[in-house]
Amino acid sequence: KQEVTQIPAALSVPEGENLVLNCSFTDSAIYNLQWFRQDPGKGLTSLLLIQSSQREQTSGRLNASLDKSSGRSTLYIAASQPGDSATYLCAASGANNLFFGTGTRLTVIP
Amino acid sequence: NAGVMQNPRHLVRRRGQEARLRCSPMKGHSHVYWYRQLPEEGLKFMVYLQKENIIDESGMPKERFSAEFPKEGPSILRIQQVVRGDSAAYFCASSPPSGGTYNEQFFGPGTRLTVL
């Protein structure tokens, strides 16, 4: 059974810093890896999707990498802003569903 | 181009009542997924449906919970005789037919169920 872990559980950084969020998964037989953002009391916003055959994806200040063999993905956020404060979730895709980590709660301090 | 729509956004029920949660997928999407997020926990898969078919219900509790996606209309997640432990956020996601970006899922805003 797929297990997804995210470290750290919470992270506080001053505005402007670059940061890395980590995600690990136990079963490398995934179709893709998605990163989401969740604001308190809100739904999920898809940030990046990396297909299993890809190594990384970029969107603006966000870059996500995938290493299937080691069961790891990272989300890199450049030049963090207070508006980036949210919980970030990674999800590994099985055949029929997504397996989610418990998230990293990010706070960017102005 | 509307995204995934869920209603109601908030639902309050007393123990023993029934809860009906609705989900309208994105236009052109034929696959619907339901997930549950318990307080302070991650999202857990419940069920995967296509029109008129349940494909995978391995995450559904064995009793009181059911889901459908009829030929016409939204997908419905039904919880009978709710208990306090059912209080959670229920999220629906949809994806296009297989092919292209396989299994990319787009999420709705969720329904927050509170059982008194």
Image (cartoon, rainbow, N blue to C red):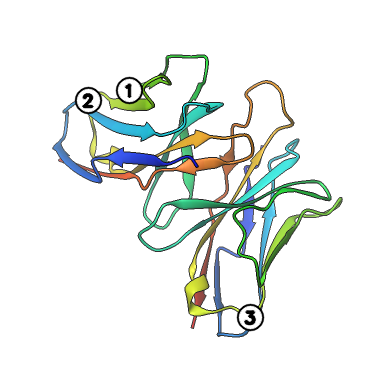
Name which residue lies at 62% across and 42% down. B3
Disc nearest the viewer among 1 and 3? 3
Quadrant in the rendering for residue B23: bottom right
Please check whether the numbered discs 1 and 3 fall on a single chain.
no
Chain assignment, label 1: A
Q: Which mark is residue A79?
A: 2
User: Which chain is home to disc 3?
Assistant: B
Q: Residues within 10 Å of mark 1 (few under 14, many from 20)?
A: few
Q: Residue at x 63, y 80 (%)?
A: B81
Name the residue carrying label 1: A61
In percent of width and height, residue B40 lies at: 35, 60
Closer to us: B65 or B93: B65
Residue B9's x, y, as percent? Answer: 56, 63
Q: Which mark is residue B81?
A: 3
**Vertical placement of residue A88 versus A61, above or below:** below
In the picture, measured across the screen, residue B53 lies left or right of residue A52, that is right
Q: Earlier in the sequence, mark 1 or mark 2?
A: 1
Image marks 1 and 2: residues in contact by CB distance under 8 Å: yes
Which residue is at the front of the view, B89 or B60? Answer: B60
Outermost residue, front side:
A1
